[in-house]
Amino acid sequence: MNQKTTAAALFCTIFLSVLFASCSSADDPVTMPESDSDQLADVTIMYYAHGGGNLDESIIGNLRQMYKAEPSSYENVKIAIEYKFSAKEAIPDTSVEWRMEELRNELEMHEEYADDELRNVDYILWMAPEGNSTFRFVLDPTKTLKEQAEGHYLEGKNADITNPDSLTNFINWAAKACPAKSYVLVLSDHGGGYRPDDDLDNENVATTRGIIYDPAHDGKHFSVVSLKKAIAAASIRPNVIYFDACLMNNLEYQFELKDLTDYIVASTFSVPDQGGIYNAFVECLSGASADMEYAFEKYIEYALKNWEVPGDTFPNYRDMTVTKTAAIDQLGKAMREFTDRLCDTYQNGTAEQKQKIDHVTKNAVKIHKRYPYYDIARYMEGMKKALPEVFDDAFWAELQTAFNSCIVGQYNSKYLLDHDYQVDYSVLLAIKGAYQELEWNFWYKKTIDYLRYYHPDGKFTTYRVENGNLEKDVEPDFTLKTYEEGVWGGTLESVYGALAFDKATGWSRWLLLNEQQPSLWCDKDFHTHLPNPIGE
């Protein structure tokens, strides 16, 4: 099913989970199977994953799903796997023994799972066995995951998975072990979207999460810079990059990776812990005979439907989009015109026009409760409604065409569709170049522990939030008390200004110019209705 965006939603989004895992420095640390280059597979899935502190059970479940695809699928699809377990000390509640006991209790409660490999916690050494271990192999559907994983652990089990050489090495190994007509790179772990303070080079490690987070290596993670470097250095060019991770469908990543692949699959909102549905993933790729657009259209529909819980009335904010990278350059040209008109009106327009722009920014649709990511399609639509004399119909039609040309497939959860909402790409918004991060109180969901501003000059200020009324539908009324000040290691100009997205669109001009604090609120966390893009 191919849900194209409409005038109400220009951008595209797809669910995917980002998988990253460690790799030793050797080119061929694990014996590869014999392969005949004349007998190329249609598709090779290159699955690179890391547990990320709390995802080991889910990702092991994803690996087991791969063995459950229709047997005929493996005639056309080969799968190369590398997976690194979380560090023991990074596991919530720290105790591996406690976690194993919890899983055994779950087995007893769900007897129907007793014979299911997905729930058999004893068949493979949990955390393998002490954490940080990494295995690598080519999937053999005639064997079990246990049989393949045991004996295929890489040396240097505590390797830095976020080193670009680690990912490059895995891609090269996978292409040699499983030569194919097309390659799909799956990256699975926690995803964190794009922030400049997360996009520092390897010498300047941020303290917050970027794409992949490895607690065993001082919190290092992939940035858009290091990810681009890793993929560009590989011996093959992946036809698809699929992020099985949260928050990765933002324009900052789309533009940066556009020349390294033909398609990008990602989610704007969060991905559920279960992540992708990999038996269906394998079957869709096999059935399409490497027709990627058709395969992923089928897959994202299947995945989104399987993320639904029958009878659940809780707001389900899930999505997935397939982006065709060949169309991104045209989108950049249209967005530059939008940015030019927005900045010119804000600086040189009437007081009424500026007030309308501020109103749209104040009510921008925030994607995540913690991070400063906003739905760019709704934001631009709000500007169009507020200032039709600036964003005329002819220009609006060009902008829509540019956005829709990027979208090969898009699927949203039933909750979003029932509310006439199609989420699209996210982008960073800021006030005078400063963007914020909110740390919510874990136990009291409607209170904030602190608010941190990352300033354009590379400094940051952390405020404790005191005496606050933080209800969504009440005007915020709270006291900010300076708690901490420091530097985050870069500047908005040097980091964001170096992005391909900013070079194409000049978006940082608006980040520096805007004087209105974008909305701090993410509606899904307050269980409210979806907002009108201009706050009416």
Image (cartoon, rainbow, N blue to C red):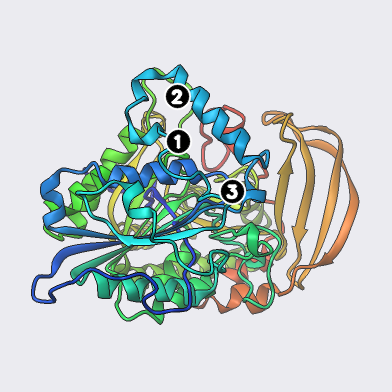
Mark 2 or mark 1, which is nearer the start of the sequence?
2
- Give the SS element for disc 3: loop
**Whether residue 443 can be seen here:** yes
Name the residue carrying label 3.
53
- The amino acid type found where label 2 is placed reads Leu
| For residue 94, side relative to residue 34 (left or right) | right
Quadrant location, the C terminus: top right
- Give the SS element for disc 2: helix
Check whether the beta carbons of the residues at disc 1 and disc 2 lie within 8 A of each other. Answer: yes
Residue beneath the point at 50% across and 27% down = 104
Could you tell me residue 359's position as x and y percent?
63, 47
- The amino acid type found where label 3 is placed reads Gly
| For residue 4, side relative to residue 334 (left or right) | left
Q: Residues within 10 Å of mark 3 (few under 14, many from 20)?
A: many
Mark 1 or mark 3, which is nearer the start of the sequence?
3
| For residue 490, side relative to residue 377 (left or right) | right
Could you tell me residue 300's position as x and y percent?
29, 45
What's the distance in space between the residues labelled 3 and 2, CA to CA? 22 Å
Name the residue carrying label 1.
121
- Give the SS element for disc 1: loop
Q: Which one is in front, 339 or 160?
A: 160
Name the residue carrying label 2.
107
- The amino acid type found where label 1 is placed reads Val
Residue beneath the point at 12% across and 74% down = 36
Quadrant location, the N terminus: top left
Residue 225 higher or lower than 8, as above or below: below
